[in-house]
């Protein structure tokens, strides 16, 4: 049985709120988002401009400041009930962020292997339908410490990338991503630092 992609109005609203946060940002290209072999997400807006965009989004969605609890942290929360299609919302948001702003680096961070496999399954299930809509397919893959070539590709590639990983992949100093004395470092820096320089959007 083929599952049909169907986004409901409230899901579209959630996606639009994400896109509107970056309203006015210059679209990323090879020329303005690549430095020293690393393709990054570059937002041309100042923190103040992003804050104003967020306030506009809050007003449009009738969310008051007490509920929003705005801080200076670069974090956004879109709250949805279980079973309302959160996974599809953030996957489609990735496509929209590339379409509007050229952002290419996305990390889906999950708490367990089971959830990781569920996310990968959803990406695979709707890949063709999303390609029919957008005309492209991000490269999505599961982080594997034995396949660091995929991480290198994530760091360098101009095409949108989605790396799905668990917290356990990097939550201690002895994890491969954090190791600074390896022969296969990226540009002589730990992989975690190179990933950081891509300025990824973490979901």
Image (cartoon, grey):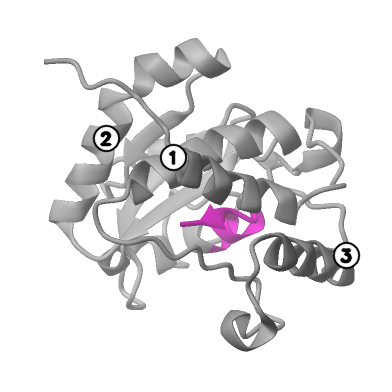
Labels 1 & 2 near each other (Cβ < 8 A)? yes
Q: Give the label on residue 43, or none.
A: none
Give the left or right position of residue 197, taking residue 148 as reference.
right
Which residue bears the numbered disc 3?
Answer: 49
Lower sequence index among marks 1 and 2: 1
| Residue 49: percent from left, percent from top | 88, 64
Q: CA distance from mark 1 to mark 2?
A: 9 Å
Q: Along the line of sight, which residue is nearer the eye, 174 or 117?
A: 117
Residue range of the region highlighted in magenta in the rendering:
193-203
Bin the neighbour count of mark 3 within 10 Å (Cα to Cα): few under 14, some 14-19, many 20 and up. Answer: some
Q: Along the line of sight, which residue is nearer the eye, 179 or 54?
A: 54
Q: Quadrant of residue 157?
A: top right
Q: Is residue 152 visible?
A: no
Q: Secondary structure at mark 3?
A: helix
Residue drawn 27% across the image and 35% down it: 122
Which residue bears the numbered disc 1?
Answer: 91
Which residue bears the numbered disc 2?
Answer: 122
Residue drawn 23% across the image and 50% down it: 116
Q: CA distance from mark 3 to mark 2?
A: 34 Å
Q: Along the line of sight, which residue is nearer the eye, 99 or 180?
A: 99
As drawn, the residue found furthest toward the front would be: 62
| Residue 58: percent from left, percent from top | 69, 67
């Amino acid at each position: 049985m083929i599952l049909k992609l169907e986004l409901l109005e409230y899901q579209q609203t959630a996606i639009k709120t994400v896109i509107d946060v970056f309203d006015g940002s210059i679209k990323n290209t090879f020329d303005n988002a690549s430095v020293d072999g690393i393709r990054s997400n570059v937002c041309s807006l100042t923190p103040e401009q992003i804050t104003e965009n967020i306030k506009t989004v809050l007003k449009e969605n009738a969310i008051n400041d007490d509920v929003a609890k705005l801080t200076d942290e670069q974090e956004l929360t879109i709250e949805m009930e279980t079973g309302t299609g959160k996974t599809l919302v953030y996957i489609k948001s990735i496509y929209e962020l590339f379409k509007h702003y050229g952002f290419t680096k996305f990390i889906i961070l999950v708490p367990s292997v089971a959830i990781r496999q569920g996310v990968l399954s959803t990406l695979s299930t709707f890949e063709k339908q999303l390609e029919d809509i957008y005309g492209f397919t991000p490269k999505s893959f599961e982080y594997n410490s034995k396949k660091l070539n995929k991480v290198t590709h994530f760091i360098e590639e101009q095409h949108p990338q989605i790396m799905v990983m668990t917290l356990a992949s990097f939550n201690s100093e002895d994890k491969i991503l954090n190791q600074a004395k390896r022969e296969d470092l990226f540009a002589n820096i730990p992989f975690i630092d190179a990933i950081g320089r891509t300025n990824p959007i973490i979901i």
